[in-house]
Amino acid sequence: MCGIVGLLVKKPELRKSLGEMIVPMLIGMSDRGPDSAGLAIFTEMLDPSHRKHSLYSGDKEFNWSELLYKFQSHFEGDTEIDSQGNHAILISDADPESAKQWIKQHYSQLYILSTGRSINLYKDTGTPQEVSDRYHFKSLKGSHLVGHTRMATESAVTAAHAHPFTAGEDFCLVHNGSLSNPYEIRRKLEPRGIKFETDNDTEAACRFLEWRMREGDNLEASIQKGFEALDGFYTFLMGTTDKLALVRDAFACKPAIVAETDDYVAIASEFRSLAHLPDVNHAHLYEPAPEELYVWTV
Amino acid sequence: MDSVIFDLSQTPLREVNQFLHHNANGKPIKILNPNGAHNIAIGLDSPISVEIAGHVGYYAAGMNQLANVTIDGNAGTGVAENMMSGRVHVKGFASVSAGASAQGGLLIIDGNASLRCGISLKGGDIVVGGSVGSFSAFMAQAGRIIICGDAADAIGDSLYEAVIYIRGTVKSLGADAQFEPMSETDYQTVGELLAKAEFCHDPKEFKRIASAKQLYHWNADANQEY
């Protein structure tokens, strides 16, 4: 069992309250996922020459300013870092692949949570309340976000195994359910040079969909291919720079409910997480149908 | 009689359920702010009336006996599952497995029911005002399901003696389910259940789906393509 939450605000003036709105939703899914939690938030786009990398260190005493200093000495150019505890967002105009390689080479203890022009990603072990407090989720601002509370069923409880998973740039996915053919997917992708970071089944789905998009499919077409390739139970919620997308498996094994008003689209595994949203009593409430694709654009 | 009112944002659910089990003494109960909580009004065993003002989570009114539970909102997974008797009325829509394994009583859903509605039904009656999702009435053994709207895939798969009456269209019949002619008794049954649920459709608009009984016995000569 896991919990999924997602939120997209339709009015720019609500972007400043995104974090405040999501925290009760995330905490509402604590019973479904008490062991880890995570959130990917999509913010204003950086200009095309810049990328931001969300970085995670298991060690809370990590020296981020030293990393910044060494990074700047190597790449020169324009770099800044915004750190809190074991998490930091590194913004740089260095070539993203070279930057990632450099981080992996010099700081192998760091985990690169996400890369992109608009995504910031946070995930860690702990209850949703603890993780929300640790990274000040309440103060997050942005247009839309994807969140997850995890109850591990098939791989270890670590920050790396927590959701959201990412692949490529500005794409993330959270999953409630379990896949029965993640290794089949992996065997298909690895010979194409696609590298996996964990043994988690969700990572296989995430990398499969991102691979389809890199091959030229749009999000919708890649998900259609996913229906054929991915076997198992799932509700997937995905985020891109300007979209949220939701799908459920053919048997609707895992729950989802959507509340839509003039102000927002809110998605959760259960209504409990939507009950406290403003004006939810007048929202259009519905359960997404199985094997149907729901996409909302900012 | 005045209702006893509980507000679930103030009173713990366990306290409310204990009151319903032991102290209701026939008094009508109203529950405010259910906010999708699980297990509201489960295991009731006396003829009391309970009104829940809002949306409920999983297994609301599960295992109900004798009580009359009205949910003025939507219901999560497994509403009225394993009901023994009494009446459960969902005024909104119901999520998956509504009325699963119900042995008796009447479940009324004004809106749609999701997948697996009435799965393994064992004698209860279900009336759905809207449509039902795939695999509804799967392996239903006894009881009646009235569907005023449509059915998605595999309705009545592996049915035993339960009977389905449907007004709308069927996307696909499940294995061993078949349409059968309506008899006078069928029209009467549909009329009675619609009246109980306060839906005013003409029973003549309904079609009967029941088991072809081809799966009752092992057939070694079959090509096993079920």
Image: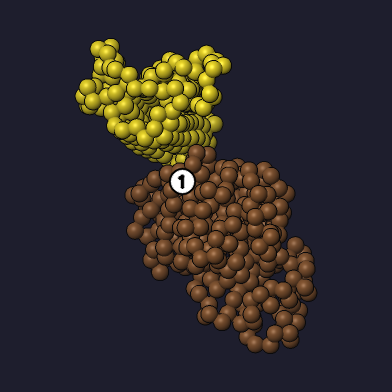
Residue at image location 28% in from the left, 28% down from the top: B167
What residue did someone put label 1 on?
A: A291
Using the rendered view, name the quadrant where residue A76 is placed.
Answer: bottom right
Q: Colour of chain B?
A: yellow
Q: Is residue B103 visible?
A: no
Would residue A241 be found to the left or right of residue B145 on screen?
Answer: right
> As shown in the figure, which amino acid type bears the numbered disc 1?
Glu
Q: Position of residue A295 (x, y in %)?
A: 43, 57
Indicate the quadrant containing the N terminus of chain A: top left, top right, bottom left or bottom right.
top right
Q: Position of residue A243 (x, y in %)?
A: 46, 62
Residue closer to the observer: A216 or A154 = A216
Occupied quadrant, residue A113: bottom right
| Chain in brown (letter) | A
Q: Is residue B17 above or below residue A240?
A: above
Which chain letter matches label 1?
A: A
Is residue B10 positioned above or below A133 on the image? above
